[in-house]
Amino acid sequence: MKHVKIPNDRIGALIGDGGETLRRIEAAAEVDIDVDSQDGAVAIERTGDPVRGMKAPEIVQAIGRGFKPDEALTLLDDDMRMFDTIDIERAARNDNDLRRKKGRLIGENGRTRELMEELTGASVVIYGSTFGVIGQPKEVDIARSAAEMLLDGAPHGSVYSFLERKRSEELKQQGMDYHEFPG
């Protein structure tokens, strides 16, 4: 049995309308999930395939870190898909610095976060004081590197160039060409 703790305001997202989301996770991951609505403690017990059951705590954590349940369930689509987080608070000196760093990761009208998703292929969420990412190992690694660059104060333009370069390298490796358009 595994135990995971999620924020109280994400319990509703985990359970879903009438328990629908919880039942979907239980069926897909072949587990039994018990949620304590008072403190956000979640107990996960494997009932079927142990490999699928091992992904269930990650699915619950991903939902707790702000991912939509459908996105978190993609962790079961492929054995290589992974979930990773960066604690933004550890990079911040105080509350103002935390807000500024979160703002740098999100970008104006969410554009930086969207570009990160678009150019890496990973899904990215900034929730509370964490940066969460779901994707293939290479996608997660590139998104994590870009986030760390932003948290260290790198200019957005440099980070966008880094992301475009990595995207171009990946497409060339797959035998495709990626053309950057100025602007």
Image (cartoon, rainbow, N blue to C red):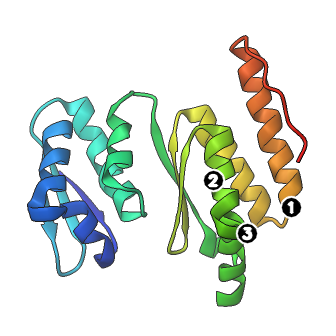
Whether label 1 touches label 2, CB < 8 Å:
no
Position above or below: 31 against 65: above
Residue 155 on image: x %, y %: 88, 62
Residue 158 on image: x %, y %: 88, 52
Q: Is mark 2 on a helix, strand or loop?
A: helix
Q: Which residue is drawn at 25% across and 70% down?
A: 11
> Disc 3 marks which residue?
104
Mark 2 vs mark 3: in front:
2
Frontmost residue, 135 versus 180: 180
Q: Residue at x 46, y 40 (%)?
A: 82
**Which label is found at residue 114?**
2
Residue 178 on image: x %, y %: 78, 25
Q: Residue at x 68, y 59 (%)?
A: 111
* Left or right of 147 in this view: 13: left
Count of number-bearing discs:
3
**Which label is found at residue 154?**
1
* Left or right of 18 in this view: 157: right
Give whichever of discs 1 and 3 has the lower sequence position: 3
Q: Is residue 6 visible?
A: yes
Identify the amino acid type marked 1: Ala
Give whichever of discs 1 and 2 has the lower sequence position: 2
Q: How crowded is mark 2: few (under 14 residues within 10 Å), some or many (20 or more)?
A: some
Q: Which residue is drawn at 84% across and 67% down?
A: 153
